[in-house]
Image: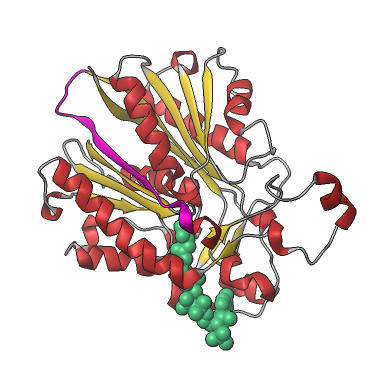
């Protein structure tokens, strides 16, 4: 049995900054409403056809691989988490294998929305710990902007989400006191439709009917979110799964050097911070600038925190996520 650790991190966000005031020009909303409810001031939207979920993931991955000090030929498995893939199928994992010109290693696509990166990291951890693989590339990337209802009808959802990508290289670590200590995953499918895009699924409709209807008022292609219900569940599940991770390792909240919560909503992060009695310097948030980037939010935030020197050798770093599914999870890391 080996240990696994994150050896390289990278992120990429599109250049195009969309402020709350920009949104208020296309829908009935305001900077004050968005900031007060979510903490978001601006987010990035792709504005070039060259930017896609895969291409942004590739850019983040190239940085992570270089920082890991390995060659892309050393990658022996790819895990890609997204809810906004370039194609209905195949998933972006194989597109990364192609675009990075990596040898024909396995590529796994993860469909766990805001928890996608935490799920992906957990899978990578198990493969490395078992000795099956040495270096795994884990990517979270999203293009939300092309799929949002940018009218007043969609404002409760559209103001929250942004585009971007983050990546990590997870490698074998012989020192068992360092690296990923444990991961904890959960789901509760009875609430699947409380935060969902239900089209173009094959659950109830024939593709021929969808094409024939071609109905511009069909909202099933846009994300639906029962905001308050999601909020209430998020604060409970975040807290539970962080506690579960700490208890598993005989740790306490005061041992946390840096908590990186999935950037769902600043008010959710602040609730969790207060619940665990953490200081501002023990929690990293960047939702103000990027909005909620779903599977990309944790790797973007972790990379930024690391670049700013907030993640140091020996630190206890806790990652926690909650989102559509519902799914939630945490990863406890001794850096
Ligand atoms: C979405 C969210 C910000 C909405 O905040 P809220 O306080 O619950 O707001 P409500 O949905 O009750 O709406 C309050 C009012 O604001 C309006 N409103 C909604 N979106 C708006 C917007 N962008 N701008 C202005 N007004 C808006 C609503 O229409 C409603 O108006 P009404 O009172 O006249 O009916 C909040 O529920 C939330 O953050 N939920 C969790 C979201 C999340 O984390 N999702 C990702 C999970 S991974």
Name the residue rendered at 69%, 54% in the picture: 146
Q: Nearer the viewer, residue 318 or 115?
A: 115
x then y, percent, for residue 320: 33, 50
The quadrant holding residue 90 is: top right
179 vs 69: above or below: below
Query: Is residue 85 in sight in this rendering?
Result: yes
Colour mapping used in the image: secondary structure
Within the magenta stretch, is there residue 178? yes
The quadrant holding residue 36 is: bottom left
Q: Nearer the viewer, residue 27 or 229?
A: 229
27 vs 298: above or below: below
x then y, percent, for residue 51: 66, 42
x then y, percent, for residue 246: 17, 47
179 vs 153: above or below: above
Report how many numbered discs are placed on residues in the image. Answer: 0
Q: Quadrant of the N terminus?
A: top left
Query: Is residue 12 in sight in this rendering?
Result: no
Within the magenta stretch, is there residue 62? no
Query: Outermost residue toward the right?
Result: 212
The quadrant holding residue 151 is: bottom right
Q: Quadrant of the C terminus?
A: top left
Name the residue rendered at 48%, 46% in the picture: 295
Name the residue rendered at 40%, 58% in the picture: 286
Q: Locate residue 182 relative to residue 166 in the image: left or right.
A: left
x then y, percent, for residue 314: 16, 37
Q: Locate residue 110 relative to residue 180 in the image: left or right.
A: right
Start and end of the magenta stretch?
Answer: 174-190
Name the residue rendered at 37%, 62% in the picture: 234
């Amino acid at each position: 049995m080996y240990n696994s650790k994150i050896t390289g991190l990278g992120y990429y966000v599109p250049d195009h900054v969309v402020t709350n005031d920009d949104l208020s020009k296309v829908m009935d909303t305001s900077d004050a409403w968005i900031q007060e409810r979510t903490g978001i001031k601006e987010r990035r939207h792709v504005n070039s056809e060259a930017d896609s979920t895969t291409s942004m993931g590739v850019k983040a991955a190239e940085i992570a691989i270089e920082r890991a000090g390995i060659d892309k030929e050393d990658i022996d498995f790819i895990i890609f988490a997204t809810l906004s893939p370039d194609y209905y199928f195949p998933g972006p994992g194989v597109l990364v294998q192609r675009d990075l010109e990596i040898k024909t290693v396995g590529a796994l696509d993860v469909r766990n929305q805001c928890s996608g990166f935490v799920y992906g990291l957990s899978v990578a951890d198990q493969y490395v710990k078992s000795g099956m693989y040495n270096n795994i590339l884990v990517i979270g990337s999203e293009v939300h902007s092309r799929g949002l209802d940018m009218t007043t009808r969609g404002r409760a959802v559209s103001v929250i989400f942004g585009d971007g990508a983050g990546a990590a290289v997870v490698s074998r670590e012989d020192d068992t006191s360092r690296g990923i200590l444990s991961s904890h995953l959960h789901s509760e499918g009875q609430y699947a439709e409380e935060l969902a895009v239900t089209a173009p699924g094959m659950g109830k409709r024939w593709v021929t009917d969808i094409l024939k209807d071609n109905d511009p008022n069909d909202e099933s292609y846009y994300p639906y979110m029962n905001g308050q219900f999601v909020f209430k569940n998020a604060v409970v599940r975040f807290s539970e799964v962080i506690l579960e991770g700490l208890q598993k390792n005989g740790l306490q909240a005061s041992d946390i050097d840096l908590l990186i919560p999935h950037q769902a909503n600043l008010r959710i992060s602040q609730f969790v911070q207060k619940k665990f009695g953490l200081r501002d310097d023990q929690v990293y948030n960047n939702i103000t600038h990027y909005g909620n980037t779903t599977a990309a939010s944790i790797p973007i935030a972790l990379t930024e925190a690391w670049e700013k020197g907030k993640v140091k050798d020996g630190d206890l770093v806790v990652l926690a996520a909650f989102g559509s599914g519902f799914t939630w999870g945490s990863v406890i890391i001794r850096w």
